[in-house]
Every structure is written in structure tokens, then in C-alpha cells.
Amino acid sequence: MKNMTETTFTQDYEKRLSLFKDNFVVNWHEHVWEDSQSGKLRENSLDRLRKSAEATCTDAVICSIPLSKPCIPDDFSRVNRLQYEACQRWDKLYGLAFIHVGYTKEALYEIEKCVYDYGFVGIKLYHHYFIDDPQQFAVIEKCIELDIPILVHAGKSVQLRSTQPKLSAGHHFANIARLYPEANIIMAHIGGGGDWQWQIKAITDSPSIVTDISGSVVDAPMIEDAIKRLGARRILFGTDGSYEAGVGKNLEANISEEDKKTILEGTAYRRFLNRRARK
């Protein structure tokens, strides 16, 4: 009986995974990591990511190496170089330039270097400043000029106020959308913890802001509510270290197959993968 149950489960999973096999799948939120001791790429982080992507027929993985603690230009330049090395070793990996906007001149230089020399497709911002802080404006304007997206660490969480006091929430994204409606901004991981309902509501009337489904939270109505308020074109597939959760959320969501495909393909953002030749 156990073997029959396992076989049935496997067959059912394989059948449902055809959604991934039969469509172009873009994971817009993942990471590899730096080994803090050696300063080199943490090999097992790349290996695990690659195995997960291959097991789920993912065609493109958008990746960065963020630093949560205060960092200087040498730091973000170093991890971007490691990200470039990872991209060179796996042709399905696409880089995002991680920068700290507190160093405006150096950040702008790093963005151009990563786009033109490394072939990166966008940038990654962490919780060093709110996304609508004026300190962000020069970087946002540079991304508009280069026509690249900005993935921003985000959340609405009381628990994180002490450790991430400048964590951008939905209203910060709504504010920046009013100031820069032409910017391509991703409010990261509605499944990353905290009040995802509040996050979705806050950006409902900001059509230039999209979000990704990454994170370990798998609340049943999350994807359905996001579809109702935002529409599938404003939702991207992402996993952020929780690959199984991301795949399961998409497969199990009570939405149309067409909406699931739109999320997996990242239809509205697909063009960013092709706009620059890979180095």
C-alpha cells in the first residue's frame, strides 16, 4: 500500500509539474552566497540552487548576493564579482547588482559596470534605506536611464522593526511609484513573512509596482488575493531560498492555468532577460 501511495503521489506530481516543463519559467528572486571566511563563492549555495532549478524545469534564475549589514563600496563590488563568476559557470543564472545607495557615486559606477561589463539585468536593494527615501533617487533615475528593474527587499512586519527599521513596506512603494511611475520596481517576497494582505492592498493602485511570490509563507489565499487586486502580469515567480514553497504555491493556487503561466513566465518583465548580450 505504501509503494502504491508513493507511486500515485509521484505520478500526480509529475503530471502537475508539466506546467513548469511546458512553459518558460523565470525565477525572479534567488541568491547565492559568499563564504565569510574565504571571501569566495559558497559552492554549495550554487549547487543547491542549480539542482532545485533543474528539478523544476526553471529556465532562468535571477540572482544576487546581498549584504544585510552596513557595507562599503569595496564590499558590494566584491560580491557582485562573485555573482558574475557564478553566472559564468551556469548559463541559466542572471545577475542583479547589489549596491548600497548611501554611497551614491560608487553605487552609480557599480551599476554601470555590472550592466555593461558583467551583463547583469537589474539591481538589488536591501533595507539600508526606505525605497522612497531621497537617497534612493539618483539610483532609481540611473535604472530608468538604463531601463533595468529594481528588486527591493520588502515587508510589513512588527517583529522586524528592531532589526530592519528601514524595511520598505507597501506604502513606501506606492509613494515612489507616484514620484517615478516609469521605474520598474519589484516589491520582493509577499510570502516573506509579515502582513502580505497589507502589502498587496498598499500597491493596488500603483500599476508600475510588481511583486514576487517568494518566501516560505504558503497561506492559501495569498496568490488568489494578489491576482484579484493586481492581476497576473504584476506578479512574478520567485523562491528566495524556499524553492519547494514557491513551486507549491503556484501549483496549488486556485487561479486559472493562464494566470499561473503568466506568473511563471514573468510576462511583463521577460524583455529584461534579452535586452543585453550575456558576457
Image: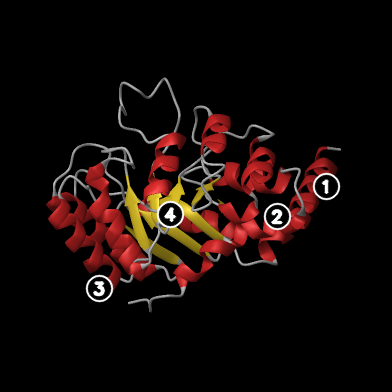
Q: Between residues 234 and 2, which one lies in front from this camera angle?
A: 234
Residue assigned mark 3: 117
Q: Position of residue 135 (x, y in %)?
A: 22, 44
Provide the secondary structure element on which disc 3 rests: loop
Res. 8 mark: 1
**Three-letter amino acid code of the residue under disc 3:** Asp
Q: Nearer the viewer, mark 2 or mark 1?
A: 2
Disc 4 packing (10 Å; few <14; some 14–19; many ≥20): some
User: Which residue is found at the position 69% from the left and 34% from the top?
Assistant: 221
Residue assigned mark 2: 259
Q: Earlier in the sequence, mark 3 or mark 1?
A: 1
Q: Earlier in the sequence, mark 2 or mark 3?
A: 3
Task: Kindly report the distance in space between the C-alpha atoms of the residues bearing marks 4 and 3.
Answer: 28 Å
User: Which residue is found at the position 69% from the left and 41% from the top?
Assistant: 224
Tell me which colouring the rendered structure shows: secondary structure
Q: Earlier in the sequence, mark 2 or mark 1?
A: 1
Residue assigned mark 4: 181
User: Answer yes or no: do the residues labelled 2 and 3 have beta carbons within 8 Å?
Assistant: no
User: Answer yes or no: do the residues labelled 4 and 2 have beta carbons within 8 Å?
Assistant: no
The quarter in which the C terminus is drawn is bottom left
